[in-house]
Image (cartoon, rainbow, N blue to C red):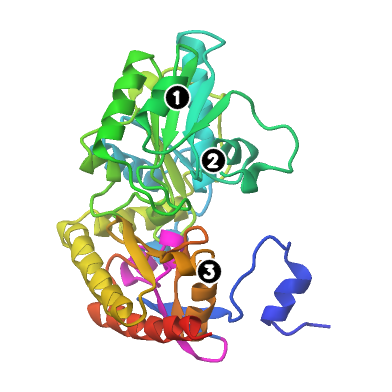
Amino acid sequence: MKLPITRELFNQIILPVYAPAQFIPVKGKGSRVWDQQGEEYIDFAGGIAVNALGHCHPKLIAALHEQSEKIWHVSNVFTNEPALILAQKLIDNTFAERVFFANSGAEANEAAFKLARHYAIEKYSPYKTKIIAFYQAFHGRTLFTVSVGGQAKYSDGFGPKPADIVHVPFNDLDAVKAVIDDHTCAVVLEPVQGEGGLSSATPEFLAGVRQLCDQFNALLVFDEVQCGMGRTGSLFTYQQYGITPDILTSAKALGGGFPMSAMLTTHNVAAVMHPGVHGTTYGGNPLACAVGNAAFDIINSPEVLEGVSKRRAIFIEELEKINAKFNVFREYRGKGLLLGAELQLPYHGKARDFLTMAAECKVMILNAGPNVLRFTPSLIIPEEDIKEGMARLAKAVEKVVNS
């Protein structure tokens, strides 16, 4: 017996680790999405910063179609042209000299953390293994990455955690100074904390952390899974600070909607690796890299990158109109189109309520913790879609406020 494909079916057959919206999206075009009943939604969520070019961008479709008739998969026993082309683009446009492809942000971060420890052990000492990370960080869901992430709610309850990981408050340089020592292999951070409320690193903090890493021969690892690939107005966020990491991870928007990720590093750091030390079956998949190449070329253009700040300004202008009526927002956070609106104290803990009501009013948004609404739309979302989506959000805010 074939069951009808409904939201209720999810509750019966999918592992209960998600609480998805009550509608099922079935079609998307640009920044608009349609559900099973043909209802239209404005997408301000972007697949959590993944759909940087919206849904079904024609150049990404063309790239996928063209590659699908060539070769789909070869594994890491062989290399392939799309992977080499994309790796070279990443190297030409960043500090990087070596690239490792994987399938998700967690896998890219897992590779980064393993590399940082292996480098320190090979170059300095078997006891140089301490990783300094930050509260409210998020680096993935593997046991290693969730342990480095500074949110106990995601890491507790799974038995012993990987050891020698220390957490300190974000943007607190004195806290880093208090724990860094000659046993530290890496300091790991997000320039903009994605899941942790969209707090941005201060220039002074990043400069200080870079200096401390140099002083103690530790590697500086930037997790740009969410804030990279044009999301904040530059190809990668580190480029706005004048601070260069030793390792950087990218995912989400890298594939424009196709699952893929990358870890970038230098020749010096990569030199400790050799065949068999790390790997992945699907990483560098030709289909993913073909789409990634098309996405990269569009995102890494002045038109798109310069348009991010213009669109952010429109979002904030529209949010301010809502705030003038309902006084729900306390401040705006993040950078570019990684935008957070912190709720006023009376609405703390209710971010999910706003998200749910927004979906009922046909606009898709996110939250970043219990107190912040998060907007990660397409980097090329049309102005008319922003204004229409904000009109729908205003209705949702009114319903929450009056409930």
Disc 1 element: strand
Q: Residues within 10 Å of mark 2 (few under 14, many from 20)?
A: many
Q: Which residue is mark 2?
A: 150
Residue 276 shows which numbered tag?
A: none
At 25% from the left and 83% from the top, the residue drawn is 384
Q: Name which residue type carries label 3.
A: Lys
- Callouts 3 and 2 close, C-beta under 8 Å: no
Q: Residues within 10 Å of mark 3 (few under 14, many from 20)?
A: some
Q: Name which residue type carries label 2.
A: Gly
Vertical side of 159 occupied by 252: above or below: below
Residue 69 visible in the snapshot: no
Of pointers 1 and 2, the one earlier in the residue sequence: 2
Q: Residues within 10 Å of mark 1 (few under 14, many from 20)?
A: many
Of pointers 3 and 2, the one earlier in the residue sequence: 2
Q: Which residues are magenta?
A: 36-61
Residue 64 visible in the snapshot: yes
At 43% from the left and 68% from the top, the residue drawn is 45
Q: Which residue is mark 3?
A: 350
Q: Where in the figure is residue 143, as x and y percent of width and height?
A: 64, 38
In-front residue for pair 365/291: 365
Which residue is situated farthest in the front direction here?
A: 346
User: Could you give the CA–CA distance between mark 3 and mark 2, rounded to whole angstroms?
Assistant: 22 Å
Q: Which residue is mark 1?
A: 186
| 81 in magenta | no
Residue 324 falls left or right of residue 220: left
In-front residue for pair 272/132: 132
Q: Name which residue type carries label 1.
A: Ala
User: Could you give the CA–CA distance between mark 1 and mark 3, rounded to whole angstroms?
Assistant: 36 Å
Residue 64 falls left or right of residue 370: left
